[in-house]
Amino acid sequence: MKLKVCVIGGAGYIGSHAVYELIRDGHEVVVIDNLSTGSRNMIHKDAKFYYGDITNKQDLKNIFNIECSVKPFDVIMHFAAKLIVPESVDKPLEYYYNNVEGVRIMLEVMTDFNIKNVVFSSTAAVYGEPVNSVCSETDITCPINPYGETKLASEKLIKWVCKKYNMNYCIFRYFNVAGADKSLEIGLNKDNLTHIVPITVQTALGIRKSMDVYGNDYDTSDGTCIRDYIHVSDLADAHVLGAKYLVENNKSLLVNLGSNKGYSVLEIIKEVEKHYPVNYKITDRRKGDPAKLIASNEKAKEILGWSPKRDLSEIINSDIEYRKKIMNKS
Ligand code: UDP
Protein backbone atom coordinates (compact mmCIF):
# COMPACT_ATOMS: atom_id res chain seq x y z
CA MET A 1 0.00 0.00 0.00
CA LYS A 2 1.48 3.33 -1.07
CA LEU A 3 0.19 6.25 0.96
CA LYS A 4 0.34 9.99 0.40
CA VAL A 5 1.38 11.43 3.75
CA CYS A 6 1.61 15.06 4.80
CA VAL A 7 4.18 15.52 7.58
CA ILE A 8 3.68 18.81 9.42
CA GLY A 9 6.94 19.54 11.23
CA GLY A 10 8.94 17.18 8.98
CA ALA A 11 12.09 19.31 9.22
CA GLY A 12 12.51 18.70 12.97
CA TYR A 13 14.27 15.91 14.84
CA ILE A 14 11.52 13.29 15.09
CA GLY A 15 9.53 14.45 12.05
CA SER A 16 12.56 14.17 9.76
CA HIS A 17 13.18 10.59 10.93
CA ALA A 18 9.54 9.71 10.24
CA VAL A 19 9.95 11.15 6.73
CA TYR A 20 13.04 8.98 6.14
CA GLU A 21 11.21 5.79 7.20
CA LEU A 22 8.09 6.67 5.18
CA ILE A 23 10.23 7.13 2.07
CA ARG A 24 12.13 3.89 2.73
CA ASP A 25 8.76 2.14 2.95
CA GLY A 26 7.76 3.54 -0.46
CA HIS A 27 5.29 6.29 0.46
CA GLU A 28 4.82 9.73 -1.08
CA VAL A 29 5.72 12.45 1.42
CA VAL A 30 4.88 16.14 1.55
CA VAL A 31 6.55 18.14 4.33
CA ILE A 32 5.13 21.37 5.76
CA ASP A 33 7.38 23.23 8.20
CA ASN A 34 7.95 26.81 9.34
CA LEU A 35 11.65 26.04 9.94
CA SER A 36 11.46 27.64 13.41
CA THR A 37 13.43 24.83 15.02
CA GLY A 38 13.87 22.43 12.13
CA SER A 39 16.03 23.05 9.11
CA ARG A 40 15.79 22.63 5.35
CA ASN A 41 18.71 20.18 5.22
CA MET A 42 16.89 17.74 7.55
CA ILE A 43 14.28 17.11 4.85
CA HIS A 44 14.78 14.01 2.73
CA LYS A 45 15.57 14.88 -0.88
CA ASP A 46 12.65 12.77 -2.13
CA ALA A 47 10.06 14.59 -0.01
CA LYS A 48 8.26 17.63 -1.38
CA PHE A 49 8.68 20.66 0.86
CA TYR A 50 6.37 23.61 1.49
CA TYR A 51 7.19 26.42 3.87
CA GLY A 52 4.11 26.93 6.04
CA ASP A 53 3.01 27.68 9.59
CA ILE A 54 0.48 25.42 11.26
CA THR A 55 -1.06 28.38 13.08
CA ASN A 56 -1.77 30.09 9.76
CA LYS A 57 -4.88 28.54 8.23
CA GLN A 58 -4.28 30.19 4.87
CA ASP A 59 -0.83 28.60 4.62
CA LEU A 60 -2.31 25.14 5.15
CA LYS A 61 -5.25 25.78 2.84
CA ASN A 62 -2.99 26.94 0.00
CA ILE A 63 -0.83 23.84 0.29
CA PHE A 64 -3.79 21.45 0.65
CA ASN A 65 -5.41 23.11 -2.38
CA ILE A 66 -2.39 22.42 -4.54
CA GLU A 67 -1.72 18.90 -3.24
CA CYS A 68 -5.25 17.56 -2.83
CA SER A 69 -6.29 18.63 -6.31
CA VAL A 70 -3.72 16.12 -7.61
CA LYS A 71 -4.32 13.38 -4.99
CA PRO A 72 -5.75 13.84 -1.48
CA PHE A 73 -3.59 13.04 1.52
CA ASP A 74 -4.30 9.64 3.06
CA VAL A 75 -2.77 10.63 6.40
CA ILE A 76 -1.57 13.79 8.16
CA MET A 77 1.25 13.46 10.71
CA HIS A 78 1.69 16.19 13.29
CA PHE A 79 5.14 16.98 14.77
CA ALA A 80 4.97 20.78 14.72
CA ALA A 81 4.99 21.40 18.46
CA LYS A 82 7.11 23.28 20.95
CA LEU A 83 8.47 20.80 23.47
CA ILE A 84 10.80 22.30 26.05
CA VAL A 85 9.30 21.89 29.51
CA PRO A 86 10.92 24.87 31.34
CA GLU A 87 10.23 27.12 28.34
CA SER A 88 6.57 26.06 28.48
CA VAL A 89 6.42 27.22 32.11
CA ASP A 90 7.86 30.61 31.06
CA LYS A 91 5.73 30.99 27.95
CA PRO A 92 2.40 29.24 28.51
CA LEU A 93 0.52 31.51 26.08
CA GLU A 94 2.97 30.77 23.29
CA TYR A 95 2.79 27.03 24.02
CA TYR A 96 -1.01 26.89 24.02
CA TYR A 97 -1.16 28.96 20.84
CA ASN A 98 1.39 26.96 18.89
CA ASN A 99 0.56 23.49 20.21
CA VAL A 100 -3.22 23.59 20.68
CA GLU A 101 -4.34 26.29 18.25
CA GLY A 102 -2.01 24.74 15.67
CA VAL A 103 -3.74 21.37 16.07
CA ARG A 104 -7.19 23.02 15.95
CA ILE A 105 -6.36 24.74 12.66
CA MET A 106 -4.88 21.55 11.22
CA LEU A 107 -8.09 19.67 12.11
CA GLU A 108 -10.25 22.42 10.62
CA VAL A 109 -8.35 22.21 7.34
CA MET A 110 -8.54 18.40 7.45
CA THR A 111 -12.33 18.58 7.75
CA ASP A 112 -12.49 21.20 4.94
CA PHE A 113 -10.61 18.82 2.65
CA ASN A 114 -12.26 15.66 3.97
CA ILE A 115 -8.97 14.07 5.11
CA LYS A 116 -9.75 11.21 7.47
CA ASN A 117 -6.57 10.12 9.26
CA VAL A 118 -4.21 11.86 11.68
CA VAL A 119 -1.11 10.58 13.49
CA PHE A 120 -0.30 12.74 16.47
CA SER A 121 2.90 12.98 18.58
CA SER A 122 2.02 13.11 22.24
CA THR A 123 4.21 12.55 25.27
CA ALA A 124 4.76 10.73 28.54
CA ALA A 125 4.41 14.21 30.09
CA VAL A 126 0.62 13.76 29.94
CA TYR A 127 0.94 11.30 32.85
CA GLY A 128 2.54 13.94 35.11
CA GLU A 129 3.98 12.37 38.26
CA PRO A 130 3.33 8.73 37.41
CA VAL A 131 1.32 6.67 39.88
CA ASN A 132 2.92 3.46 38.63
CA SER A 133 6.57 3.27 37.62
CA VAL A 134 5.58 1.35 34.47
CA CYS A 135 3.02 3.56 32.71
CA SER A 136 0.21 2.07 30.73
CA GLU A 137 -2.25 3.92 28.54
CA THR A 138 -5.07 3.55 31.06
CA ASP A 139 -3.11 5.39 33.79
CA ILE A 140 -4.50 8.66 34.98
CA THR A 141 -3.36 11.72 33.00
CA CYS A 142 -2.40 14.70 35.13
CA PRO A 143 0.30 16.87 33.53
CA ILE A 144 2.50 18.99 35.78
CA ASN A 145 3.62 21.56 33.21
CA PRO A 146 2.12 23.56 30.33
CA TYR A 147 3.89 21.41 27.73
CA GLY A 148 2.13 18.25 28.98
CA GLU A 149 -1.14 20.16 29.31
CA THR A 150 -1.01 21.36 25.70
CA LYS A 151 -0.43 17.80 24.51
CA LEU A 152 -3.27 16.44 26.60
CA ALA A 153 -5.58 19.24 25.42
CA SER A 154 -4.61 18.44 21.82
CA GLU A 155 -5.28 14.72 22.36
CA LYS A 156 -8.76 15.54 23.64
CA LEU A 157 -9.46 17.99 20.83
CA ILE A 158 -8.41 15.38 18.27
CA LYS A 159 -10.66 12.74 19.88
CA TRP A 160 -13.72 14.98 19.83
CA VAL A 161 -13.17 16.17 16.26
CA CYS A 162 -12.56 12.60 15.03
CA LYS A 163 -15.77 11.49 16.72
CA LYS A 164 -17.83 14.28 15.18
CA TYR A 165 -16.41 14.04 11.64
CA ASN A 166 -15.91 10.28 11.43
CA MET A 167 -12.13 10.53 11.32
CA ASN A 168 -9.41 8.29 12.80
CA TYR A 169 -6.53 9.20 15.08
CA CYS A 170 -3.35 7.43 16.06
CA ILE A 171 -1.94 9.09 19.18
CA PHE A 172 1.58 8.10 20.25
CA ARG A 173 2.84 8.93 23.73
CA TYR A 174 6.63 9.04 23.53
CA PHE A 175 9.08 8.39 26.29
CA ASN A 176 12.80 9.35 26.06
CA VAL A 177 13.78 9.58 22.41
CA ALA A 178 17.42 9.63 21.28
CA GLY A 179 19.80 8.49 18.56
CA ALA A 180 20.18 9.24 14.87
CA ASP A 181 19.29 7.75 11.50
CA LYS A 182 21.68 5.09 10.14
CA SER A 183 22.55 7.37 7.19
CA LEU A 184 23.86 9.92 9.73
CA GLU A 185 22.30 12.59 7.51
CA ILE A 186 19.89 13.60 10.30
CA GLY A 187 19.96 13.59 14.10
CA LEU A 188 19.35 15.85 17.07
CA ASN A 189 21.25 19.03 16.24
CA LYS A 190 20.24 22.01 18.36
CA ASP A 191 22.10 24.76 20.17
CA ASN A 192 20.57 24.36 23.59
CA LEU A 193 20.39 20.64 24.20
CA THR A 194 18.87 19.56 27.51
CA HIS A 195 18.54 15.78 27.11
CA ILE A 196 20.83 13.34 28.81
CA VAL A 197 22.02 11.28 25.81
CA PRO A 198 23.31 14.12 23.62
CA ILE A 199 24.71 15.96 26.66
CA THR A 200 26.65 12.88 27.78
CA VAL A 201 27.94 12.27 24.24
CA GLN A 202 28.96 15.91 23.84
CA THR A 203 30.87 15.68 27.13
CA ALA A 204 32.58 12.49 25.97
CA LEU A 205 33.59 14.15 22.71
CA GLY A 206 34.98 17.21 24.52
CA ILE A 207 32.30 19.59 23.19
CA ARG A 208 31.44 20.16 26.88
CA LYS A 209 34.06 20.14 29.63
CA SER A 210 31.81 18.43 32.14
CA MET A 211 28.19 17.54 32.82
CA ASP A 212 25.91 17.45 35.84
CA VAL A 213 24.03 14.43 37.12
CA TYR A 214 20.91 15.85 38.72
CA GLY A 215 20.71 13.99 42.03
CA ASN A 216 21.83 10.56 43.24
CA ASP A 217 19.46 10.26 46.19
CA TYR A 218 16.39 8.93 44.37
CA ASP A 219 14.81 5.68 45.41
CA THR A 220 16.42 3.68 42.58
CA SER A 221 19.20 1.07 42.40
CA ASP A 222 22.05 3.60 42.08
CA GLY A 223 20.15 6.69 43.28
CA THR A 224 19.88 8.36 39.84
CA CYS A 225 16.68 8.66 37.80
CA ILE A 226 15.54 5.86 35.57
CA ARG A 227 14.06 6.50 32.12
CA ASP A 228 12.86 4.49 29.15
CA TYR A 229 15.09 5.29 26.13
CA ILE A 230 13.91 4.67 22.63
CA HIS A 231 15.74 5.01 19.31
CA VAL A 232 14.26 7.73 17.10
CA SER A 233 14.20 5.31 14.14
CA ASP A 234 12.08 2.84 16.15
CA LEU A 235 9.71 5.70 16.82
CA ALA A 236 9.69 6.57 13.12
CA ASP A 237 8.90 2.91 12.27
CA ALA A 238 5.92 3.09 14.62
CA HIS A 239 4.62 6.13 12.71
CA VAL A 240 4.71 4.23 9.44
CA LEU A 241 2.82 1.33 11.05
CA GLY A 242 0.35 3.76 12.63
CA ALA A 243 -0.40 5.44 9.28
CA LYS A 244 -1.02 2.09 7.61
CA TYR A 245 -3.15 0.92 10.52
CA LEU A 246 -5.49 3.90 10.18
CA VAL A 247 -5.99 3.43 6.46
CA GLU A 248 -6.37 -0.37 6.63
CA ASN A 249 -8.60 -0.57 9.70
CA ASN A 250 -10.52 2.70 9.68
CA LYS A 251 -10.15 2.69 13.50
CA SER A 252 -8.44 4.92 16.07
CA LEU A 253 -5.76 4.03 18.61
CA LEU A 254 -3.71 5.54 21.42
CA VAL A 255 -0.48 3.82 22.47
CA ASN A 256 2.69 4.39 24.44
CA LEU A 257 5.98 4.05 22.60
CA GLY A 258 8.58 2.78 25.02
CA SER A 259 10.63 -0.33 25.67
CA ASN A 260 9.35 -1.76 28.98
CA LYS A 261 12.90 -1.23 30.22
CA GLY A 262 14.63 1.54 32.12
CA TYR A 263 18.19 2.79 32.51
CA SER A 264 19.56 5.09 35.18
CA VAL A 265 21.50 8.27 34.39
CA LEU A 266 24.70 6.54 35.57
CA GLU A 267 23.98 3.59 33.28
CA ILE A 268 23.72 5.99 30.33
CA ILE A 269 27.07 7.49 31.29
CA LYS A 270 28.60 3.98 31.62
CA GLU A 271 27.35 3.07 28.14
CA VAL A 272 28.96 6.18 26.66
CA GLU A 273 32.14 5.45 28.64
CA LYS A 274 32.51 2.20 26.71
CA HIS A 275 33.66 4.57 23.95
CA TYR A 276 35.18 7.62 25.71
CA PRO A 277 35.55 8.81 29.32
CA VAL A 278 32.91 11.23 30.61
CA ASN A 279 33.67 13.99 33.10
CA TYR A 280 30.65 14.43 35.37
CA LYS A 281 29.68 15.62 38.83
CA ILE A 282 26.67 14.93 41.01
CA THR A 283 24.59 18.04 41.67
CA ASP A 284 21.20 18.81 43.21
CA ARG A 285 18.03 17.30 41.83
CA ARG A 286 16.43 19.03 38.87
CA LYS A 287 12.91 20.29 39.57
CA GLY A 288 10.05 18.08 38.45
CA ASP A 289 12.01 14.89 37.71
CA PRO A 290 10.12 11.73 38.68
CA ALA A 291 12.42 8.95 39.95
CA LYS A 292 11.37 6.32 37.44
CA LEU A 293 9.47 6.48 34.18
CA ILE A 294 9.07 3.39 32.04
CA ALA A 295 6.42 2.65 29.40
CA SER A 296 4.54 -0.54 29.03
CA ASN A 297 4.54 -1.27 25.29
CA GLU A 298 2.18 -4.24 25.40
CA LYS A 299 -0.54 -2.33 23.59
CA ALA A 300 1.76 -1.16 20.77
CA LYS A 301 2.92 -4.75 20.37
CA GLU A 302 -0.57 -6.15 20.35
CA ILE A 303 -2.20 -3.62 17.99
CA LEU A 304 0.65 -2.57 15.70
CA GLY A 305 3.05 -5.49 16.11
CA TRP A 306 5.61 -2.88 17.14
CA SER A 307 8.40 -3.14 19.67
CA PRO A 308 11.80 -1.44 19.62
CA LYS A 309 14.46 -3.16 17.49
CA ARG A 310 17.38 -0.99 18.55
CA ASP A 311 18.89 -1.23 22.05
CA LEU A 312 20.67 1.30 24.24
CA SER A 313 24.09 0.59 22.73
CA GLU A 314 22.73 1.33 19.25
CA ILE A 315 21.09 4.54 20.50
CA ILE A 316 24.38 5.72 22.01
CA ASN A 317 26.53 4.57 19.06
CA SER A 318 24.35 6.37 16.54
CA ASP A 319 24.37 9.59 18.58
CA ILE A 320 28.18 9.43 18.91
CA GLU A 321 28.64 8.83 15.18
CA TYR A 322 26.20 11.61 14.26
CA ARG A 323 27.82 14.11 16.61
CA LYS A 324 31.30 13.24 15.31
CA LYS A 325 30.05 13.81 11.79
CA ILE A 326 28.55 17.24 12.50
CA MET A 327 31.65 18.25 14.52
CA ASN A 328 33.88 17.51 11.52
CA LYS A 329 31.63 19.57 9.28
CA SER A 330 31.67 22.71 11.40
N1 UDP B 1 19.78 14.57 33.39
C1 UDP B 1 21.00 14.78 34.04
N2 UDP B 1 21.87 15.67 33.50
C2 UDP B 1 21.63 16.36 32.34
C3 UDP B 1 20.39 16.13 31.68
C4 UDP B 1 19.50 15.24 32.23
O1 UDP B 1 21.26 14.20 35.09
O2 UDP B 1 22.47 17.16 31.91
C5 UDP B 1 18.84 13.61 33.96
C6 UDP B 1 17.48 14.22 34.28
O3 UDP B 1 17.50 14.79 35.57
C7 UDP B 1 16.58 12.99 34.19
C8 UDP B 1 17.22 12.14 33.09
O4 UDP B 1 18.56 12.62 32.98
O5 UDP B 1 16.60 12.27 35.40
C9 UDP B 1 16.54 12.29 31.76
O6 UDP B 1 16.39 13.65 31.50
P1 UDP B 1 16.10 14.23 30.05
O7 UDP B 1 16.08 15.72 30.14
O8 UDP B 1 17.03 13.60 29.06
O9 UDP B 1 14.64 13.66 29.73
P2 UDP B 1 13.23 13.80 30.54
O10 UDP B 1 13.05 12.45 31.18
O11 UDP B 1 13.33 14.92 31.50
O12 UDP B 1 12.26 14.04 29.46
Image: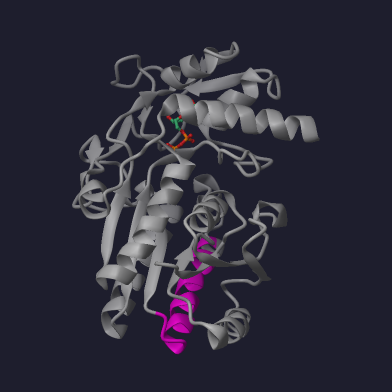
| Residue 113 lies in the magenta-colored region | yes
Q: Is residue 34 left or right of residue 155?
A: right
Task: Return the residue found at the far right.
Answer: 330
Q: Residue at x 69, y 18 (%)?
A: 209
Q: Residue at x 31, y 84 (%)?
A: 165
Q: Is residue 131 above or below residue 213?
A: below
Q: Quadrant of the N terminus?
A: bottom left
Q: Is residue 82 above or below residue 68?
A: above
Q: Is residue 293 left or right of residue 299?
A: right
Q: Residue at x 58, y 87 (%)?
A: 65
Which of 156 and 285 lies nearest the eye of the viewer?
156
Q: Quadrant of the C terminus?
A: top right
Counting every numbered tag in the picture gives: 0
Q: Residue at x 44, y 17 (%)?
A: 266
Q: Is residue 69 above or below residue 293?
A: below
Q: Which residues are magenta?
A: 95-115
Which of 106 and 233 lies nearest the eye of the viewer?
233
Give percent across and percent down for residue 278: 58, 14
Q: Main secondary structure of the magenta part?
A: helix
